[in-house]
Amino acid sequence: MHLAAEAPAPALHGDWPHAAQSRFARVRPHHWHIQEMGQGPEILFLHGAGGATHSWRGVLPALEAFRGVAVDLPGHGFTKLGARQRSSLECIAQDLAALCASEGWDIKGIVGHSAGGAIALRLSGLLPGSPPVLAINPALQPFHGVAGVVFPMAARAIATLPFAVDLIRRTLVAPDRAAQLLAGTGSRLDPEGVALYARLLRQRAHVEGALLMMAQWSLEGLMADLPKLGTKALFLVGDGDRTVPPVTALEAARQMPAAEVESLGPLGHLAHEEAPAEVARRIETFFALHA
């Protein structure tokens, strides 16, 4: 059921990639930003933490046999977060399932990057027919060590200290550090790609949304369910990924009844932005067989 918007969504400028294909949908609890492109069976695209629909800017136009439906995750990009406590993997999957039902999408496959790959695996089981999943450098390893302590602390700080998000923006994720942060993923993006991430880092709501997602992130339920997931899955991994060790995809696939892993060669964590045509080809091949 569509509801009247309670507050405007973040402003989408005309020079944002594929802005002409953008629209907004108010489906409880969030105000979603959606991009749709192409013809054929519908494939849902989910970006990773800190990303947005722009990360698929080269992939979506390269699809020949499918209709790509890309969504900004809650609090990311131009999707207005409607509930601060619904940024966990489980809640995001549930809210995406509600969006798909409200929009009447007949999802035949899901593509997810990094954290979006984990969400895709959980979402598949919530959609009719459990559509197959193609995950690019999927984040299928729980946070350990310092990160396991810092992210819960960040959640508490964001919830109780009004200045916490602004402090993090000025220090850890300042827009002028975009190139440095991206280089740390093992990927080499062109100047346009770097500039788009810098624009996102200037949006306070986007930074807060990404931090809330990371702070509430837990893979325990999904990892426990891997041996009984009947979803057909393909994990594409970049050997140069410095964010998510490629071995984690191999370990996860061994636990699943119907999962395979393919290498993308020396590409990094943002492989789909480095080589969109190649990734689009792999997507077309996989879903032509399984969608």
Image (tube, rainbow, N blue to C red):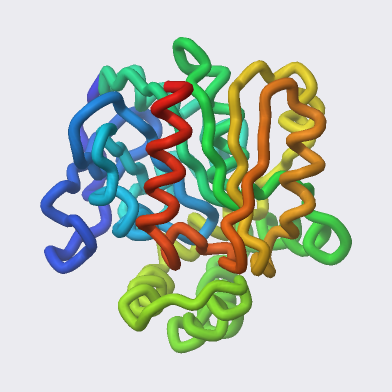
- 260 relative to 225 in the view: left or right: left
Q: Residue furthest top?
A: 129
Q: Residue furthest bottom?
A: 176
| Residue placed most toward the observer, 146 or 136 | 136
| Residue placed most toward the observer, 173 or 5 | 173
Image coordinates for residue 237, horizontal then vertical, percent = 63, 53
Judge whether residue 167 can be spotted in this image. no
- Name the quarter where the N terminus is drawn: top left
- 7 relative to 150 in the view: left or right: left
Image coordinates for residue 23, horizontal then vertical, percent = 18, 43
Judge whether residue 255 can be spotted in this image. yes
Corner quadrant of residue 223 = top right
Image coordinates for residue 134, horizontal then vertical, percent = 53, 37
73 above or below 289?
Answer: below
Residue at image coords 12%, 64%: 14
- Name the quarter where the C terminus is drawn: top left
Image coordinates for residue 140, horizontal then vertical, percent = 71, 44
Residue at image coords 37%, 73%: 193
Q: How many marks?
A: 0
- 40 relative to 161 in the view: left or right: left
Residue at image coords 54%, 69%: 165
| Residue placed most toward the observer, 172 or 253 | 253
- 77 relative to 260 in the view: left or right: left
Corner quadrant of residue 253 = top right
136 above or below 234?
Answer: below
152 above or below 128?
Answer: below
19 above or below 282?
Answer: below
Residue at image coords 54%, 67%: 162
